Image (cartoon, rainbow, N blue to C red):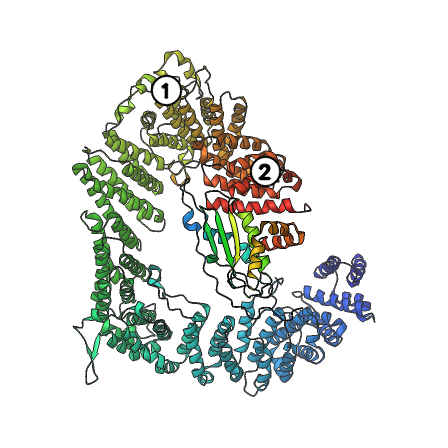
Amino acid sequence: MVSGLINENPIVYEIKERRDVRAYSSNTDELSVDAIDQLEVFDILFVCLDIKDPEHPYSLEQLKVLTEDSVEVDDSKSRVRVTFTPTVEHCSMATIIGLCVRVKLMRSLPSRYKIDIRVAPGTHATEAAVNKQLNDKERVAAALENPNLVEMVDECLSPSFE
Amino acid sequence: MAALNNLTEHLEAFVDVTRSPTHHAESLKAIATSLEKSVLSINQLVVEMDMYLTTTDDVVRARGILLLAEMLDYLKSKPLDNAVVNSLVGFFTAKLAEWRSVRGALSGCLALIKRKGVAGLVTATDAEAVAKSMAQSVQVQSLALYDRKLCFELLECLLEQYPEAMINLGDLMVYATCEAIDGEKDPPCLMVAFHVVELLARLFPSPSGPVASEASDLFEFISCYFPLHYTHTKGDEASIPREDLSRGLSLAISSTPFFEPYAIPLLLEKLSSSLPVAKVDSLKCLKDCAVNYGVNRMKKHYEGIWSAIKDALYASTGTDLSFGLESLTSPGFEMNEIHREAVNLLQRLVKQDISFLGLVADDIRVKMIFDTISRYSRYEEMLDTSKLEVLVVSQILSVSARASVESCNTIFETFFVRLMNTLGIVESTSTGDLVHNENSTVSTRLYHGGLHLCIELLTASKDLIPSSEEDSSTPGCAQQSWCSIVNKFSASLIEAFTSAVQSSNDDCTADAYLGVKGLLAMGMFRGGSSPVSRSEYEKILTTLTSIIAANSAKTVKWELALKALVCMGSFIDQYHESEKAMSYMGIVVENLVSLVRSSHCSLPHPMILEATSEVCSTSPTYVEKMVQGFEEAFCSSFSDFCVNGNFKSIENCSQLLECVTNKLLPRVTEIDGLEKSLVSFAISMWNQIESSVVFSYAFNGREFVEAAMKTMRQIVGVASVNSQNSIIQKAYNVISLSTLPAMESIPLTFAALEGLQHDLSTRDELILSLFASVIIGASPMASIPDVKSLIKLFMVSSLKGYIPAAQALGSMVNKLGVGSGGTNTSSDCSLEEACDIIFHESFESGNTNSSDVTSKTICGSETLLAKICLGFYGSLDLQTRAITGLAWIGKGLLMRGDKRVNEIALVLVECLKSTNSSGNALHPTAMKHAADAFLTLMSDSEACLNRKLHAVIRPLYKQRFFSITVPILESLIVNSQTPLSRTMLHVALAHVISNVPVTVILDNTKKLLPVILEGLSVLSVDSVHKEILFSLLLVLSGTLTDIKGRQSVSDNAHRIIECLVKLASYSHLMVVRETAIQCLATLLELPHRRIYPFRREVLQAVTKALDDPKRRVREEAIKCRQAWTSISSRSTPF
């Protein structure tokens, strides 16, 4: 159908040095509570970062599709919102990336959390449709009934040991 | 004949291509052995093989020839007849033309050419024929990989072994090589091919030779590989690493000067590429070329190379100059590989040809540096571009200066004076003469960039001083002009650096850093002819020492100065600079040691100690001085405390002792004579205690006693037996003069022990603890006077609750009677007697109703000590102390493998039962102590009875105790009546299980697993047991991962999962939850049918753990959940 690449020349960013949270969270105080924070959720999404752009061998982090700052967490209100930025306006991967992120968070965060996945405003041609699709419980559940989709998501989420 | 019959069989087997390779190898081996043993001669073999070598069947003939070639490879070191070799070479040479049998022919030629130093060599004429035939009839690039490699090896071998013959061939060899290499792509072949080029170049050095005339073609064939890049990196393990191949290529390119017109432009072009690998390779190769092509040929490329080096340096240098502690002895900024190689190349070029330096000196950017420097005074204020300029230019200049003495002279003459001028150290007058500016106010003109450049140059020049002054062939460095320049400015330089340090404040570390680094550079010139005079050197030391003494907090400046002093100290020690050592001793060491001694100093005591110990560790002479100083400081502080009640002094004492334990004792093996000074330190500790008869003030806290005990124990531990004896004697004298001997006379009866209400005085307690430490540290060879009364003393004091006394008892029973090979004359008491005193003597003067037991030689539950333990007599306090004491004594006996420990174990087990044999209920506290006694028995103790403290340790003692106690504890657990006793038994069992090596557990998994699981559930009830619960869980996790325990783990899977699920929400210890979840993830390795039924439970538990308050638990839970979800959603089990 489409000849040539959708995005011929993506901008590649340098990956930001990750600060090590564990270094100072390993205190001996048994009673203190480490609240779930932005970085932890970002770490959870780490496997999603390995999802390769189908056109280029760059990870989502290098392409700044997902960054640390795109995660907002409110532990007390049990809310998390992930905003991702497709590289081009008509990126066909947007929904599958969103679905992977949602499934990963559903599996990794306590059930009390409300998960909200969004495409960054103004970065996608069918922004509203994608947002609606990703945040509609029924639709997500239906998508996960589809064995092909589940397999694809699982493949994206299974840790790669390269 | 049998050999010949077999031969036909083997020949058939090898020739038949349908057989397996192992078959082939076997038959080869068989024939080779018979040839080696001379059962079969090579002539016979050839005759027998006649049919195979001449048949018209191509496959069989190829195999036949290969067989003969392989045989010759086997016989490389066996002498052969010259005629045979001659005819064989002729045969193989002829066969080279036949492409079907080319492999055999190649390996045959190679095997024969490789023959070296044995009878039967290939003649030069034959070798020539081989080379000719090969050049004419073998199409290398049309062959398979292995054959190609053989070709290259054959070429290599011919060139190496028959150079004269190959020279005769001339052009032909060069053509053949060119043709062979053209289009080669496999690293193993290329590796050999590059070497062939190198050999050719060596063989034809003349400018009219074939290599010179074919240089452009030959270079074209090899240069196309530059820079090397592997397209397929994976799956080729046997392949050659890129570095090796690239090194080979570099050697080939630099092999002959005839390549120069082609190579240098190519390398310079590749250097401008953006690929880092290409840059690094080009720089390396340029360096090789510079070495091999010679100065004259390189000269015309100097400008191009210089600008390339400059670009590489500018591109690879960062602008971050570190002012940290660690960079004091290093360049201070990060260097990548490009940078390193560029620096190497520059240094090589300057070293080779001083005229290259002209380019450097005339470079506009280098000349501009002085403007840049004087524009900014602080480094932070500089623009990034200026920072870069300063760093790169200082790097260029220092590298060039480091290259050779001449270059250093030139650099110093050209730049140093100007630099001094910029820094304001000299002023140029109107007449152009330079005048030394004596009264310059240097502090106002501190330019960080200039200081940095200056330091770099000084550091570079100091490396040029020859290592040995006696080397008379080179003129001493004092005659060199750089040296006289430095000498001229040294005083002002030192002043400048000093003022930089002194003017620095806390928020600007750059000043302090540059100042200290400059002083360090000035202080590191080697030898008597150094440009820095002695008085100036001493000035440097004084400045640095005063920085250390003056500061009252641990600032960066302080740390920098300390590190600089340590560097200088080790420098002196390394090069045996006796004169400097004297100055160092007089200024630095003496000053610091006197600081330790004086109690009135602005510097906090720990900092003085740190500085002194760091500085003095650089040389043994200083250490001796320091220990003396410490001794005096200890004595004065201690008496100050005793007389004036100055608590500050006693605090100083404990810090001092800690410093001795942590800094000095670990280095006792490295420094000669340290042991002796430490022993004298220990003895003066005793002297001091002896002389302070009255303690006017009580200690507040045990800190000092603990520190003193630790130091004493370790000093005795490292001391030789003779020194140990003298310390023991001294300590014994002190103790016998104290009020302690009164305690020995207390009869070991219940009534008397119960009466011991009053506590020991502070002094007695100190003496007792220290004496116990001495005994704990003593080796079995050391002689202890009056053992019997000492045992009594320790018995009494341990029953009064002094744990060191109990440990000393344990140590004594552990070491008694094993010294000097069993014939111990020094000790007046055997182990039997000692045990009698401990367990029995009490009875003789004690209760009359049990006097009948004294005849028994065991120490079972009928002795007084046992009875106290069991609570027959006395208060609860006495009981718990007796149990603790018994545990230490038991440990001593257990480690030496004495049987009496069994009885002790029985007594302890008895204490764990809810009611003892006579029906009295045991107090819970006593039971708890008894359970903990098992920890004392099994665990390795830091404080006593370890290898460092000369304990007698029988191998496998833990295993032995394990096999004795575990069955007893298990049966008691089954029959236990009360929950408390059950818990305590589990605690004891857990102590035993978790301290035994894991292999023992793995051998008994089947039996132990149910008990461990029960223990885990019992111990998880009360948070008091969290630590032991964790150790037990670790044991369980050890069994889960091992193959040995797999079967029983699989059998108990349901119970294990149940238990782990419960522990996943254990609220008292985070690591327990974390480990439990990790264990759950490990269980997935079990057969699918065993674990599948539990997925729901596990997933529920892990999902709950996702909301754990601790992050580490959550992380594990995420991983575990992912793993378990994947087994439950999978449609097929595998």
Task: Tell me the amino acid under the disc marked 1.
Answer: Glu
Front position in the image: B669 or B229: B229
Q: Quadrant of the rendered structure where residue B798 is?
A: top left
> Which residue is label 1 attached to?
B841
> Which residue is label 2 attached to?
B1097
Chain letter of the residue carrying label 2 = B
Above or below B880: residue B206? below
Alpha carbon separation for disc pair 2 and 1? 61 Å
- Label 1 crowd bin: few (<14), some (14–19), many (20+), radius 10 Å: many
Q: Quadrant of the rendered structure where residue B566 is?
A: bottom left
Side of B107 where B615 appears, left or right: left
Number of the label disc, if any, that sits on residue B1046 = none
The location of residue B958, given as percent across then percent down, is 49, 34
Front position in the image: B237 or B524: B237
The location of residue B331, given as percent across then percent down, is 36, 66
The location of residue B656, given as percent across then percent down, is 27, 45
Q: Please report the residue visible at 59 percent of the width from the left and 38 percent of the height from the top.
A: B1097
For the C terminus of chain A, which image quadrant?
bottom right
State which mark lies toward you, 2 or 1: 2
Q: Please report the residue visible at 33 percent of the width from the left and 50 percent of the height from the top.
A: B672
Residue B38 in sight in this render: no
Front position in the image: B644 or B190: B644
For the N terminus of chain A, which image quadrant?
bottom right
Above or below B830: residue A141? below
Extreme residue in the bottom direction: B208
The location of residue B718, given as percent across then percent down, is 35, 43
Task: Tell me the amino acid under the disc marked 2.
Answer: Glu
Side of B826 where B142 appears, left or right: right
